[in-house]
Amino acid sequence: MSKPLDLFISYAHKDKAMKNRLIPHFAGMVSSGVADIWHDEFIEPGDRWFDEIDREMQKADAALFLLSSDFLNSNFIQQVEVEKLLTRHHEEGVLIFFAILRPCDWKPFKYVSDIQLLPTEAKPVTRHRLADTAYTEIASAIRKKLQEHKERQNKVLIPVSIDPLQFSKNSLLKLIPGGSEKLFGREKELAQLKEAGEKGGVFVWVGSGGVGKSALTRRWLLDGEWGSDTRFFGTSFYSQGTKDQAATSGQFLAD
């Protein structure tokens, strides 16, 4: 079983009671290994509270913001927790959830309005006849999203070719286009390839399709003095002129 995702909960302390009523509804996702929950009440006496919050924000796979007027009015939440986690959302793909606890004017906050809100139709928890109905909806929606995220992370690449590849110069030459034995006007590039081969490392040709990259590589392979222990690997990410047969990174990784 893969590691549970880390869900960071951000809330205003005036909403502590509502947060505590919500937490038990996450029992399903916790017991099934979908996610582990963290909020600031896990900070123990003697801990450096800011360091603990920062550490948990850095390791979080997802964040749940519990909206209320006090949440939106908190400088610490807005300038530290919201800013940090939204940055990670944009740069690293951390999942973000917003749940409205109490009626508040959240629409001027663009970072809120850009993401689908919970509960349904952005109806605050306190406007529901039964608060547990709203809490259950919030927990269920988050669990489903986290489960889907885990499944995407855990997908195993299935090789699309099961034939073992022969990593030899001769087998590679059969795959590379540009079969003519003659190559004109590429002395400078051939010298660069020879020098790169002697120095080792990675050498990259960049150019549009059809300019002769494959033919140049083929000439270099034919001209090189390769030891019997030398092995080669070649692949293509595009089948020129056959759009429907364009290669994928999946084939490259499988090979």
Image (cartoon, rainbow, N blue to C red):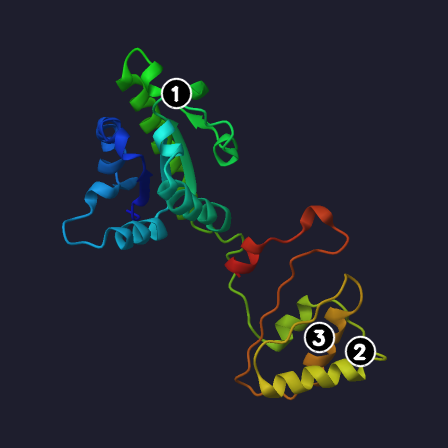
Q: Amino acid at mark 1?
A: Pro
In this rendering, which labeled residue sits more in front, label 2 or label 1?
1
Residue 88 at x, y = what percent?
Answer: 45, 49
Secondary structure under tag 1 reads loop
User: Residue 163 or 96: which is nearer the viewer?
Assistant: 96
Q: Position of residue 96 (x, y in %)?
A: 42, 38
Q: Residue furthest top?
A: 129
Residue tagged by mark 3?
A: 217
Q: CA distance from mark 3 to mark 1?
A: 66 Å
Horizontally, residue 109 falls left or right of residue 138, namely right
Residue beneath disc 1 = 103
Q: Are marks 2 and 1 in contact (CB under 8 Å)?
A: no
Secondary structure, mark 2, is loop
Which secondary structure, mark 3? helix
Query: Camera-side residue: 30 or 49?
Result: 49
| x, y percent for residue 105 | 45, 24
Spatial CA distance of label 2 from label 1 is 76 Å
